[in-house]
């Protein structure tokens, strides 16, 4: 599964669309002035049809290319809600869809009026009236046009995380080595996608073998501090990860230079245990510069919590990473 927003094209803002229509209208006018094969009536109809066609075609592009919320996977729907607001997104598309029907109604009425008209002055008056009404529909939907134009810029940057592909979600407090581990357990040149998830970056890598392809996600700014300290947007972003099939790899920093205490790191682990119904693999990172008393204390505490198998690693030096990676692959195979 790829991101439903991956192939979104650039959408024009209201001002961009008005300028585009204006430029095409002037070009058409220049052509009509030199045309001797068209009647005055046909020329006025051509002007109306240009405005009608450009506005309608653009509105139809929005309705037909923007993914509908009913067809978006819950994972991506949560991300959509975090980034732009799912209700505002849905409302904007519905309003544009209704505007298409209004455009069609105006166009039909214009054609009916033309059938009844017989003078050049009447044709001109009908054309001015009809184009004014068509542009009025465009203007009334300005905020929805601009909202969706800005929305696509955000949604196109979402990496193609497949929530159905078994995934190792790497968690832990800042500076514990999450990104280093993701790179270490991914392919030699992993695909790394920075993505503005709230105010930080979500990093996606792939674990590829002969008969499998799994994902690894680093979660800076998300699973790195207690849920009680989260704002609603961050909490919703975390909830989105619940839809991803996989396991959580929780890293502890046991180094002598570690910034966070064991108590702080254990508190975040407890929050993750409560928030996610996923298997958790625990690794003690930076073992090459470990505070041995800290390691001993942590192992004792974790075993009392039921963690029997603990991995001692250095993601930077590669110590113990292969064993951890093999276990991650084994657990992801069970899920797949």
Image (cartoon, rainbow, N blue to C red):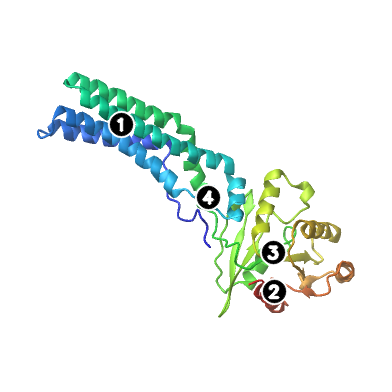
Of labels 3 and 2, earlier in sequence is 3
Residue 267 showing in the rendered view: yes
* Distance of label 2 from label 1 (alpha carbons): 62 Å
Q: Nearer the viewer, residue 184 or 249?
A: 249
At x 56% / y 69%, what residue is drawn?
190
Q: Which callout, 2 or 4, points at the residue further toward the start of the chain?
A: 4
Number of other residues with Cα within 10 Å of mark 1, as a class: few under 14, some 14 to 19, many 20 or more: few
| Residue placed under numbered mark 4 in the picture | 155
Q: Position of residue 185 (x, y in %)?
A: 64, 72
Q: Nearer the viewer, mark 3 or mark 2?
A: 2
Question: Label 1 to label 4, Cα distance in Å?
Answer: 36 Å
Front of the two marks 3 and 4: 4
Q: Which residue is mark 2?
A: 331
Residue 114 % position (x, y): 23, 26
Above or below, 311 against 56 in this view is below
Q: Residue at x 43, y 38 (%)?
A: 13
Q: Which residue is mark 3?
A: 170
The answer to which quarter of the image holds residue 131 is top left
List the residue tagged with mark 1. Answer: 108
Q: Residue at x 22, y 34 (%)?
A: 46
Q: CA distance from mark 2 to mark 4?
A: 31 Å
Question: Looking at the picture, does residue 60 appear above or below residue 187?
Answer: above
Q: 119 left or right of 269?
A: left
CA gap between label 3 and label 1 equals 58 Å
């Amino acid at each position: 599964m790829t991101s439903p927003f991956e192939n979104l094209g650039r959408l024009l803002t209201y001002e961009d669309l008005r300028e585009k229509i204006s430029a095409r209208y002037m070009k058409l006018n220049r052509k009509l002035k030199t045309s001797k094969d068209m009647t005055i009536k046909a020329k006025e109809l051509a002007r109306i049809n240009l405005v009608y066609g450009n506005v309608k075609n653009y509105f139809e592009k929005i309705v037909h290319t923007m993914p509908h919320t009913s067809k978006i996977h819950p994972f991506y729907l949560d991300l959509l809600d975090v980034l732009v607001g799912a209700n505002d997104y849905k409302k904007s598309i519905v309003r544009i869809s209704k505007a298409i029907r209004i455009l069609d109604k105006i166009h039909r009425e214009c054609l009916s009026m033309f059938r009844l008209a017989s003078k050049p002055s009447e044709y001109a008056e009908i054309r001015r009236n009809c184009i004014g009404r068509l542009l009025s529909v465009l203007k009334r939907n300005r905020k929805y046009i601009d909202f969706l134009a800005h929305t696509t810029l955000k949604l196109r940057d979402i990496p193609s995380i497949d929530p159905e592909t078994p995934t190792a979600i790497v968690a832990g407090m800042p500076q514990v080595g999450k990104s280093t581990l993701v790179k270490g357990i991914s392919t030699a040149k992993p695909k790394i996608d920075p993505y503005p998830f709230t105010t930080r970056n979500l990093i996606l890598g792939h674990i590829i073998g002969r008969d499998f392809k799994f994902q690894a996600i680093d979660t800076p700014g998300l699973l790195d501090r207690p849920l009680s300290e989260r704002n609603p947007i961050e909490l919703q972003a975390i909830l989105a990860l619940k839809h991803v099939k996989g396991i959580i790899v929780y890293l502890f920093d046991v180094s002598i230079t570690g910034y966070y205490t064991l108590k702080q790191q254990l508190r975040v682990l407890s929050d993750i245990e409560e928030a996610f119904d996923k298997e958790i693999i625990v690794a003690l990172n930076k073992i090459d510069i470990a505070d041995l008393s800290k390691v001993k204390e942590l192992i004792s505490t974790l075993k009392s919590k039921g963690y029997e198998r603990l991995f001692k690693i250095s993601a930077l030096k590669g110590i113990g990473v292969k064993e951890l990676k093999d276990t991650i692959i084994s657990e992801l195979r069970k899920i797949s």
